Image (spheres, helix red, strand yellow):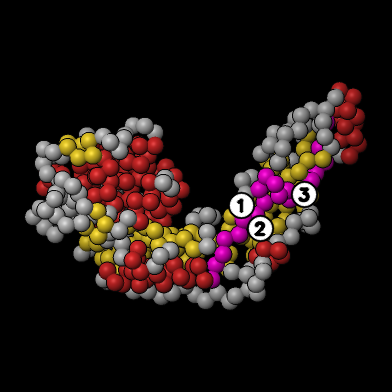
Amino acid sequence: MKKIAALFLLASCSFSALAQTMSLPVPAAPTMDVSSYALLDFQSGELIASHNPDTRVEPASITKVMTVYVAFDEIKHGRLKLSDTALISEKAWRQGKDSSESRMFIEVGTRVKIEDLLRGIIIASGNDASVALSEHMAGSESVFAEMMNQYAKKLGMKNTHFADASGLPDPNHYTTARDLTILGRALIRDFPEMYKIFAERSYAYSGAPKVKAQPNRNGLLEKDPSVDGIKTGHTSAAGYCLLASAQRDGRRLISAVMGAPSWAGRETSSLELLNYGFRFYETVSMFGATKPVSTIRVWKGSEEQLAVGVLPALSMALPRGSSAQIKAVPQITEQAVAPIKAGQKLGTITITLNGKPLRTVPLVALKDVPEGGFFHRISDSVQMLISK
């Protein structure tokens, strides 16, 4: 089959309607007293702003987001139930007894519901609950850490390695601000209902009646109503860290702030970052099954015209008001010869902003086109030979 390289402008697809306001000048991202940060647009998965996003840092108790992610996935696939109970080992019970580490206050030898352990991890940030849950799911914390690393690889966390379930310091326990936003996005995307626990303000474990209800460590839940999660972390080596998510007007951002000098600093920096992203950027959706880029000639098919476009719909985080400057240039690289299946790649489409390429994605068929009748196929074969 002879390939063609026909460039054509996208006359039928205008993005001017997407921009209802004048383009805003976008200032540089805020400068903050932290070791690293990343701000991610949830819908597109793109980083809007970052500082040392791929520098290895200690995740501290933000580690527990992965501990919870693994548990949520086990529940989703029926391998774990909220009503199941875990036997509390001496190792789990001892976590934090002789220090200021976070605890849920479970007792050795007792059985605790998985639902309670999850709240003890998410809200109270209990190291004891983290160890107990990991032992229940994997037999030992070290084996569970391997499970965590498998999940990290699957999610695309390229610079992360876990050594334990709670986030205690270890030379082989590290992550990056970018990887944490990837994890936060996966948690919210894959388990939207269970994620709601991260917004709960406090938790009192009924098995420890002498312990007062423990407040959620994420202070942003009280300061900004748009924030609905997710997790704090702190050790002397890691500093004060916060993985946060907020949703405003149907748009969600996720921020990871690492190595702040104080708990107040991590909250202030996180809000600055979230406010910056919501103020100066927008998420634009383009194409999809109902929005073809154009139509092209089909050979030997039951139909002669085929709608081509992008599947699934493409989302991009752009400077607010700049979508009117977006252009899309398709390039057909394959002749459309029936039979054709929806999703079959026929070329590429390059998205540019003010002449600068942003992304190139496959251009595909938007519907099936079966073969035409015998005589039609013969006629098209002749025409194809003549057109060479």
Under circle 3, the secondary element is strand
Please give left or right for residue 129 compared with residue 357 in the image: left
The reply to whether the C-beta atoms of the residues labelled 1 and 2 are less than 8 Å apart is yes
Decide which of tag 2 and tag 3 comes sooner along the chain: 3
Which-is-in-front pick, marks 2 and 3? 3
- Rounded to the nearest whole Å, what is the CA distance between mark 2 and mark 3? 15 Å
Image position of 279 with respect to 202: above or below: below
Q: Residue furthest top?
A: 374
Q: Which residue is mark 3?
A: 294
| Quadrant occupied by the C terminus | top right
Q: Which residues are magenta?
A: 280-300
Please give left or right for residue 145 compared with residue 269 in the image: left
The disc placed on residue 351 is: 2
Q: Residues within 10 Å of mark 2 (few under 14, many from 20)?
A: some
Which-is-in-front pick, marks 1 and 2? 1
Q: Residues within 10 Å of mark 1 (few under 14, many from 20)?
A: some
Amino acid type at mark 3: Ser
Question: Which sits in the foreground, 59 or 65?
Answer: 65
- Rounded to the nearest whole Å, what is the CA distance between mark 1 and mark 3? 16 Å
User: What x and y, as percent, mark residue 143?
Assistant: 25, 37
Q: Which residue is mark 1?
A: 314
User: What x and y, as percent, mark residue 80?
Assistant: 31, 34
- Residue 172 can be seen, yes or no: no
Amino acid type at mark 1: Leu
Q: Residue at x 44, y 67 (%)?
A: 274
Q: Is residue 26 magenta?
A: no
**For residue 2, what is the image quadrant?**
top right
